[in-house]
Image: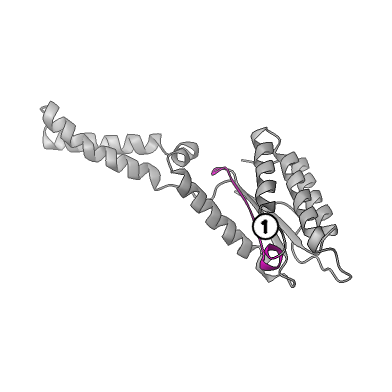
Amino acid sequence: MRLFSMADEARISAAIADAEQRTSGEIVVVVAAQSDGYHYVPPLIAGIVSLLVPWVLIYFTQLSIVQIYLVQLAVFAIVTAALMPLRVRTALVPASIRRMHAHRRAVEQFLAQNLHTTGSRTGVLLFVSVAERYAEIIADQAIDAKVPDGTWQAIIDDLTAAIGAGQPTEGFVAAIGAIGTALAAHFPPGSSDPNELPDHLIILQ
């Protein structure tokens, strides 16, 4: 499944490059289709349901033990198959668990994209996980020490509102521009300002 058209990806990548021209900070944007497969959810729920089946059949039918066992296996298989589609199994996971998985993926990406290795510790990650409907900005220590509290959350709120309104590309372009503005106020471009990290949108399927 393609999350953005090639033209949209080009617009977002251009927004990253433009924002980085105004600051010595490094901005990386990662969009993940999902942060976890949640493949354990369907068999877990199916197992619980199938464990209840024998009690019902024992009290209300005259089926033999073998027949009850076969029905139990069939219920397990049917419920597992019914709950296996990604949207279904993701929806069955509590929101707090989905946020935990998405936040963990964001932290992993902050490290995987080497944002913690920039020379001046001014790396910023904009991370969005589509299946979990989760967005987060993670900044390295030099940035967090200067950027006012609430700055990142305000940007995330605007981004999620744009996505909810069906304008994800516009939301990303605006969010990247806002990150660049926040960084430029404290970390203007220097005479020696190497571009240490990629400027293009990173998409994880």
Q: Quadrant of the N terminus?
A: top right
Eyeballing the image, is 46 above or below 184? above
Describe the element under mark 1 as helix, strand or loop: strand
Would you say residue 139 sits in the magenta stretch?
Answer: yes
Whether residue 106 is visible: yes
Left or right placement of residue 17 versus residue 123 in this view = right
Eyeballing the image, is 193 above or below 34? below
- Which residue is found at the position 55% from the left and 42% from the top? 131
- Along the viewing direction, whichever of 95 and 182 lies nearer the viewer: 182
- Along the viewing direction, whichever of 160 and 54 lies nearer the viewer: 160
The residue carrying mark 1 is 125
Whether residue 203 is visible: no
Magenta part of the chain: 131-145
- Which residue is found at the position 54% from the left and 44% from the top? 132
**Residue 55, quarter of the rendered image:** top left
**Residue 58, quarter of the rendered image:** top left
The image shows residue 24 at horizontal and vertical percentages of: 81, 64
- Which residue is found at the position 55% from the left and 47% from the top? 34
Left or right placement of residue 181 versus residue 163 in this view = right
- Along the viewing direction, whichever of 180 and 170 lies nearer the viewer: 180
Residue type highlighted by circle 1: Leu
What colour-coding does the image apply?
Answer: one colour
Left or right placement of residue 26 versus residue 68 in this view = right
The image shows residue 163 at horizontal and vertical percentages of: 66, 38
Would you say residue 174 sits in the magenta stretch?
Answer: no
| Number of residues whose C-alpha sits closer than 10 Å to that of mark 1, classed few (under 14), some (14–19) or many (20 or more) | many
Left or right placement of residue 187 versus residue 38 in this view = right
